[in-house]
Every structure is written in C-alpha cells, then in structure tokens.
Amino acid sequence: VIFGALMGALAWNIITWFYGIPSSSSHALVGGLVGATLAKAGGVAPIVWSGFGKILIFIVISPMVGFFIGGMLMVLVAWVFRNKTPHQANTWFRSGQLLAAAAYSVGHGGNDAQKTIGIIWLLLITAGAASTDVATLPMWVVYACYGAIAWGTYLGGWRIVKTMGTKITKLSSVSGSCASMGGAMSLGLATLGGIPVSTTHTITGAIVGVGTAQDVNAV
C-alpha cells in the first residue's frame, strides 16, 4: 500500500516537474495513500475522515490565507515606505528578501518534511518496528527526511521556479519579500495547528495576494 502511494505521488511529481506546473506534492502524497488504501481495502472503511477531511478543507483555505497575509504585508510595507523612492525601498529589501526566503524555507521544511516522516513512521508501525507512541520514531528518520528535502531544494526544480517567479506576477525585492514572509507565516500557523497543507498552494496564494495588492491586472 505504501509503495503504491509513494509511486503514485512520485509519478505525478515527475510529470508536473517536466511541464513546470507548481502542483502540491503534499496532496499528491495524500491522494496516493488514499488511492492505494481504497484499492487494497475495496472501500472507504479504512479512511479516517477526521484527518482526511481536514486536509480536504485546507486545500481551499491555505491559498486563501496565503493570499490574505501576503496582500496585507504588501499594503503594510507600501504604507511604511510611502516616503521612500522605489529604489530606496528595494535597497532595504535586497537583504530582507534573504531573511524572508529563509523564513519560508523553515516553514516549508516544518510542514512538508513532516508528511514524509509520517509515511515512514506508518511503514515502521505496520512492520512492527515502532508503535503509535512518537517516542518510538527513530531520529534517523527525521534527519533523513530533512536532509532529503534540503538536498532536493538545492538541486532545484527550475521549471517550477520559473513558473513561480515569472509567470504569476512580476516580483521585485519588496514584493518577493512580502510573498515569502506571507507564505512563511501561513505555513507556521498551519504547522502549529498540526495541519498538513500544500506549501506550493500557500506560496502561490501569497504571490497572487502581493500582485493583487499592487494591481489586479498585474497577476
């Protein structure tokens, strides 16, 4: 079941990477797990709806939260720097953009890597190598998942980077910082609430929110 879930998610990730589509790896993983479970059980009986239902709801909510926070940050920054020229503001945010990107990266790992850790934990439980007590989860699983997500980010899916950076709205140092920080704050709230959301959809919502705050036609 877990092999089927991972292969289904991986196949979709490769297809969307090839075409530069910023789809949700999280939802692909959840969908793969549910699909493989349904095929194995021949019905919906094994699905825990309290958890799966939460994920379905936040497919809609997480981009909206990113949109709202990103847009509000852009409005706030525009007001704070209202007496500065665009060049002066961009000078400030060249460094600020690095901080915002770092914050978003922490939010990304804090939410996305946990899902893979959860899948491996599920495998260990079914194999009898761990229990549902989190203390039985080996730390090598945690380090392996964080190492893999960091390495994957370093290697880069540049087709998707191009879509996010240039094909949604035009980003400057200021707007890029607001989008990254909006995504980071949204992911932080979701992670604190124990809600597995799509980091891709959240940051997309933040980018659209930033673009809309400047000019709806710029999106």
Image (cartoon, rainbow, N blue to C red):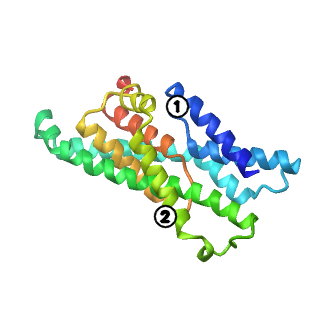
What whole-number distance in Å separates the C-alpha atoms at marks 2 and 1?
Answer: 29 Å
- Amino acid type at mark 1: Trp
Q: Position of residue 127 (x, y in %)?
A: 75, 65
User: Nearer the N terminus, badge 2 or badge 1?
Assistant: 1
From the viewer's side, name the closer residue of 34 and 214. 34
Q: Residue sitting at 53 percent across and 24 percent down?
A: 19
Q: Is residue 116 left or right of residue 77?
A: right
From the viewer's side, name the closer residue of 155 and 122. 155
- The answer to whether residue 199 shows anywhere in this view is yes
Quarter that holds the C terminus: top left
Q: Is residue 17 above or below residue 148?
A: above
Residue under label 1: 17
The disc placed on residue 192 is 2
- Amino acid type at mark 2: Leu
Q: Position of residue 90 (x, y in %)?
A: 17, 38
Q: Is residue 52 above or below residue 214?
A: below
Q: Position of residue 107 (x, y in %)?
A: 42, 54
Q: Badge 1: how crowded within 10 Å, few (<14), some, or many (20+)?
A: some
Q: Is residue 12 left or right of residue 212?
A: right
Q: Label 1, secondary structure: give it.
A: helix
Q: Label 2, secondary structure: give it.
A: helix
From the viewer's side, name the closer residue of 97 and 81. 97
Asked if the residue at tag 1 contacts the one at tag 2, i.e. Cβ–Cβ closer than 8 Å, the answer is no
